[in-house]
Image (spheres, rainbow, N blue to C red):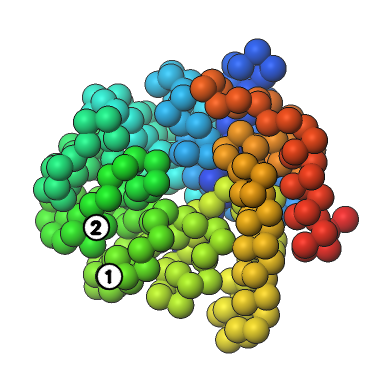
């Protein structure tokens, strides 16, 4: 490989996509957004155009422009920019992968197609192989999120032998709740030095016990510092402190879920907590009432004793 494949570890913020009030992408917000992540939340790694970023609601051109801006504005500030390139079309996915390589992204992530779904692990591996071939010098990560895709294939089955097909394969973003499957992924990945990143923020501590190498999540946009405290406590063997921080995350997210906590709500909560104007979601998601976002933001502040 011509590019140094730095292992992806630690905390990665799954970024929101700033939109104007008219629903157009708002690139000028990305610079201040990066400053907020790095200076206020101590987060230096991002996952762009994923679920939190409404990637499937964006055009190929919009996704390219956003990815390019994150890479441009992130130079010297962000340690790694991972660009999600998955789509329903393998041709679009390959085009986005090639573009990510051309702008200096540090890796690409690929979700499974979810309309015409792969029927077995072989089909999904073949899809990933063709994407990897379009950007062979970039680390490729499989993004597993069955709650959104409806693709319930066990990730351990997908990983089995994938290194023989995709030399650039570097790991998994595991956004499922099957800890048995997760544990098997970690076990298989050990001999290949791959990264397994967990994507269910309120259950991260359980995944850490199984040996994941980090986490990718939406709440790390505004709770990055607190999540890092939990990671540090775990690494230092301070389990009571780590559990306390995880329980606080669970409490805040449970409160939010009881009010209805989708990407649109989460995006508005981020705006309330960060002061960034991230704008509305794109249809068919509906804008979040400001009062709901403010209620959730206040709960988060009270839970973590934030000012």
For mark 2, does the 10 Å Cα neighbourhood hold few (<14), some (14 to 19), or many (20 or more) residues?
Answer: some
Residue lying at 68% horizontally and 75% vertically, measured from the top left: 244
| Residue that protrudes farthest toward the front in the picture | 258
The residue wearing badge 1 is 184
Classify residue 169 as left or right of residue 220. left
Q: Can residue 263 be seen in the rendering of this structure?
A: yes
Hey, which quadrant is residue 126 in on the image? top left
Locate residue 286, reporting x and y percent.
60, 25
Q: Are marks 2 and 1 in contact (CB under 8 Å)?
A: yes
Classify residue 12 as left or right of residue 299. left
For mark 1, does the 10 Å Cα neighbourhood hold few (<14), some (14 to 19), or many (20 or more) residues?
Answer: some
Task: Say which label, 2 or 1, has the lower sequence index.
Answer: 2
Indicate whether 231 appears above or below 293: below
Residue lying at 28% horizontally and 35% vertically, measured from the top left: 113
The residue wearing badge 2 is 154
Locate residue 103, reporting x and y percent.
43, 32
Quote the CA–CA distance across marks 2 and 1: 10 Å
């Amino acid at each position: 490989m011509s590019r140094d494949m730095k292992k992806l570890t630690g905390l990665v913020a799954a970024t929101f996509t700033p939109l104007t009030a008219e629903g157009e992408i708002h690139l000028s917000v990305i610079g201040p957004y990066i400053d907020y992540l790095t200076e206020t939340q101590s987060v230096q790694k991002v996952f762009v155009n994923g679920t939190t970023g409404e990637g499937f609601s964006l055009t190929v051109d919009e996704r390219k422009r956003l990815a390019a801006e994150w890479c441009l504005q992130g130079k010297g500030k962000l340690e790694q920019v991972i660009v999600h390139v998955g789509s329903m079309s393998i041709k679009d996915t390959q085009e986005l992968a090639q573009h990510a390589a051309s702008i200096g992204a540090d890796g690409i992530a690929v979700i499974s197609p979810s309309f015409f779904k792969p029927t077995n692990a072989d089909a999904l591996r073949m899809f990933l192989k063709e994407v990897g071939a379009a950007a062979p010098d970039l680390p490729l990560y499989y993004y597993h999120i069955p709650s959104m895709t409806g693709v319930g294939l066990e990730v351990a089955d997908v990983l089995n032998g994938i290194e023989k097909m995709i030399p650039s394969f570097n790991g998994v973003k595991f956004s499922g709740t099957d800890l048995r499957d997760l544990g098997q992924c970690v076990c298989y990945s050990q001999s290949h030095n791959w990264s397994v990143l967990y994507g269910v923020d309120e259950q991260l501590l359980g995944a850490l016990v199984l040996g994941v190498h980090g986490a990718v999540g939406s709440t790390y946009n505004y709770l990055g510092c607190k999540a890092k405290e939990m990671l540090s406590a775990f690494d230092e063997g301070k389990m009571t402190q780590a559990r306390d921080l995880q329980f606080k995350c669970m409490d805040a997210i449970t409160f939010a879920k009881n009010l209805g906590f989708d990407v649109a709500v989460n995006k508005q909560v981020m705006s309330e907590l960060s002061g960034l104007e991230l704008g509305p979601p794109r249809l068919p998601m509906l804008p979040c009432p400001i009062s709901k976002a403010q209620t959730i933001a206040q709960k988060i502040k009270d839970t973590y004793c934030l000012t």
